[in-house]
């Protein structure tokens, strides 16, 4: 059969590390897998603007305000490239946004946690962007060309965000007793949810099979999580903060940190929509979208009028 | 009043207007009608806060008491702010924000154009740099005024109302007092009546393209020169100043 031959050619390309491009033939499942993954990533960038946006108006110095604003703006830009990459798979940004708003598509659960103090701006940059980088560095080698190129561009900015976040929390950890308390509290609240960002254990991750074979995903959830932990533990020690895991211990033999069990009930609860901010985040997105409807309509109407004028002229 | 005292006040006017408008613009983050516009609006916020930092830092140097940009932004009360009344108006809907930005950036555009030749080097340099930014702000907001004005029936009506509502805060932009008088003599400041003429040309030209009409000149509010504000400013400051006020010993 034709499809079998096409599929073989496709797999041969993947095995030879040749990127798949939008015009190339691809199995329908590959397309669907990528549509889901890239749009979910795009939605995460956009929804992720909210917990950090929560502190722009209260940033404690003008410099801090500018840095935070610019950071969130980068995230909006990431959303933009990722929607563009997802659109190359034959679905429009509007359709993807519709899926988000009707809860057919997900976004990273980490953004369903609230940001409760200025230290959270540190914790989010340090841990959330830090975890995102581990995942995204790996995705630079993903097999789909537009996604891989978007990741290369995004990774540079993410490592900048991670350093800025670390700078905020490090500064607070060395500040007044109240600041230090806020810093530790932020780490306590964001540590476990950051580990959950990598997803379930490999043994509980049903969609992985093809993702790995097709080189969409280059490393497994558990491998990526371990990398993140290994690089982050010392960063906490350096600034005198304690990682809230009594089981965390260096394992000389493995050359990795051992760590305690993740609360998977919490994870699934948040995924299912019961996190502290799920409803708020989605309602916020829908409200902005609906409030902007008349603006988008006006812009379209104006563009149409200009087009008609040109046709007449 | 010495020249330094007058110039100090002049810097606060410029710095405060940029700061308050920048704070307002930053409220748009994650609330824009499309991502591209979210980015554009926060870009404007970034430029404005950058302008504020330069002017407030300079004010601190002129005053010579060691106050920093953050001391000015975070440790003053309503009655010590000299921003334009227009800059503190709430964002409202996208049309309200568009009109407020258009009126304000057209003001800044014509103001910085002439202040680029100020005899005070800092004011001149600040104006040259800011002019580049506000040229973009003006173009961006004017394009939206035209799109909304000449878009749909709904957008036309909405934005015409925004214009009518905000017009009464534009008189305040051009008021002058002894500070201006002294600085104009020194070749540092400019006559705002001249700025107003150019500003009006821009407003009329864009309104015309947007098929909007200019409201009748009725009562104009004033306050900027005497640091008299609307009630909105106090709430904006309470939010903005929260951390440095709550933790006076902390450095961030
Ligand atoms: Fe990002
Ligand atoms: Fe990301
Ligand atoms: Fe980021």
Image (cartoon, helix red, strand yellow):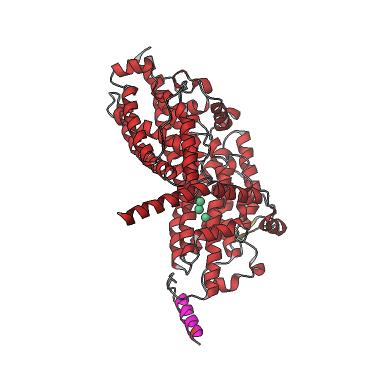
Name the foreground residue: A186 vs A280: A280
The residue sitting at 50% across, 30% down in the picture is: B88
Q: Which residue lies furthest to the bottom in this view?
A: A1
Q: Does the magenta stretch include residue A243?
A: no
Hey, which residue is sitting farthest front in the picture?
A312
Expressed as whole percent of the image width and height from the top left, the position of residue B25 reads 48, 38
Q: Is residue A211 visible?
A: yes
Dominant secondary structure of the magenta stretch? helix
Against A111, residue B172 (above or below) is above
User: Is A61 located above or below residue A225 in the figure?
Assistant: above
* Quarter the N terminus of chain B occupies: top left
Magenta stretch in the rendered image: A3-15
| Residue occupying the far right of the picture | A265
Judging depth in this view, the residue of A73 and B25 nearest the camera is: B25
Q: With A300 as the anchor, is A200 left or right in this view? A: right
Task: Tally the marks.
Answer: 0
Q: Is residue A235 visible?
A: no
Would you place residue A22 above or below residue B195 in this image? below
Residue B247 x/y as whole percent = 59, 30
Q: Residue at the location (43% across, 40% down)?
A: B44
- Residue A231 picture quarter: bottom right
Give residue A221's position: percent from left, percent from top.
60, 64
State the image coordinates of residue A123 (x, y, percent, origin top left). Answer: 58, 46
């Amino acid at each position: 059969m034709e499809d079998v031959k096409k599929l073989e050619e496709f797999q041969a390309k993947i095995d030879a590390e040749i990127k798949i491009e939008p015009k190339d033939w691809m199995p329908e499942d590959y397309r669907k897998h990528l549509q889901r993954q890239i749009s979910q990533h795009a939605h995460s960038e956009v929804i992720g603007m909210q917990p950090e946006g929560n502190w722009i108006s209260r940033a404690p110095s003008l410099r801090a305000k500018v840095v935070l604003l610019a950071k969130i703006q980068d995230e909006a830009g990431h959303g933009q490239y990722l929607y563009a990459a997802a659109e190359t798979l034959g679905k429009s940004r509007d359709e993807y946004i519709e899926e988000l708003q009707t809860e057919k598509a997900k976004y990273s659960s980490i953004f369903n946690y609230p940001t409760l103090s200025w230290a959270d701006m540190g914790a989010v940059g340090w841990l959330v962007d830090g975890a995102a980088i581990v995942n995204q560095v790996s995705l630079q080698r993903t097999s789909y060309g537009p996604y891989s190129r978007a990741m290369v561009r995004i990774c540079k900015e993410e490592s900048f965000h991670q350093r800025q976040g670390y700078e905020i929390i490090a500064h607070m950890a060395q500040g007044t007793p109240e600041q230090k308390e806020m810093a530790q509290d932020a780490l306590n609240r964001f540590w476990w949810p950051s580990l959950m960002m990598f997803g379930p254990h490999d043994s509980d991750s049903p969609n992985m099979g093809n993702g790995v074979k097709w080189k969409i995903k280059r490393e497994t959830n558990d491998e990526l999580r371990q990398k993140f932990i290994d690089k982050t533990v010392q960063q906490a020690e350096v600034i005198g903060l304690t990682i809230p895991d009594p089981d965390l211990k260096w394992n000389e033999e493995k050359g990795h940190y051992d760590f305690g069990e993740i609360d998977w009930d919490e994870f699934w609860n948040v995924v299912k929509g019961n996190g502290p901010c799920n409803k708020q985040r989605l309602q916020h997105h829908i409200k902005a979208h609906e409030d902007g409807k008349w603006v988008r309509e006006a812009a379209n109407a104006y563009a149409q009028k200009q087009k008609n004028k040109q046709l007449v002229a | 009043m010495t020249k330094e005292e007058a110039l100090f006040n002049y810097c606060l006017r410029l710095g405060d207007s940029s700061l308050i408008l920048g704070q307002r613009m930053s409220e748009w983050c994650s609330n824009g009608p499309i991502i591209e516009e979210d980015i554009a609006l926060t870009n404007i916020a970034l430029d404005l806060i950058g302008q504020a930092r330069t002017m407030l830092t300079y004010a601190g140097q002129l005053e010579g008491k060691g106050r920093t940009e953050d001391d000015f932004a975070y440790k003053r009360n309503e009655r010590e702010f000299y921003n334009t009344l227009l800059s503190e108006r709430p964002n409202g809907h996208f049309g309200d924000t568009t009109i407020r930005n258009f009126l304000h950036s057209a003001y800044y555009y014509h103001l910085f154009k002439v202040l680029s030749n100020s005899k005070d080097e800092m004011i001149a340099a600040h104006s040259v740099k800011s002019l580049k930014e506000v040229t973009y702000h003006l173009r961006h907001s004017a394009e939206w005024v035209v799109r909304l004005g000449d878009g749909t029936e709904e957008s036309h009506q909405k934005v015409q109302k925004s214009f009518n509502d905000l017009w009464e805060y534009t008189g305040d932009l051009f008021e002058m007092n002894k500070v201006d008088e002294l600085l104009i003599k020194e070749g540092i400041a400019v006559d705002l009546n001249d700025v107003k003429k150019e500003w009006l040309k821009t407003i009329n030209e864009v309104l015309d393209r947007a098929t909007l009409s200019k409201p009748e000149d009725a009562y104009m509010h004033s306050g900027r020169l005497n640091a008299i504000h609307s009630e909105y400013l106090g709430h904006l400051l309470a939010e903005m100043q929260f951390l440095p006020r709550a933790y006076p010993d902390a450095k961030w």
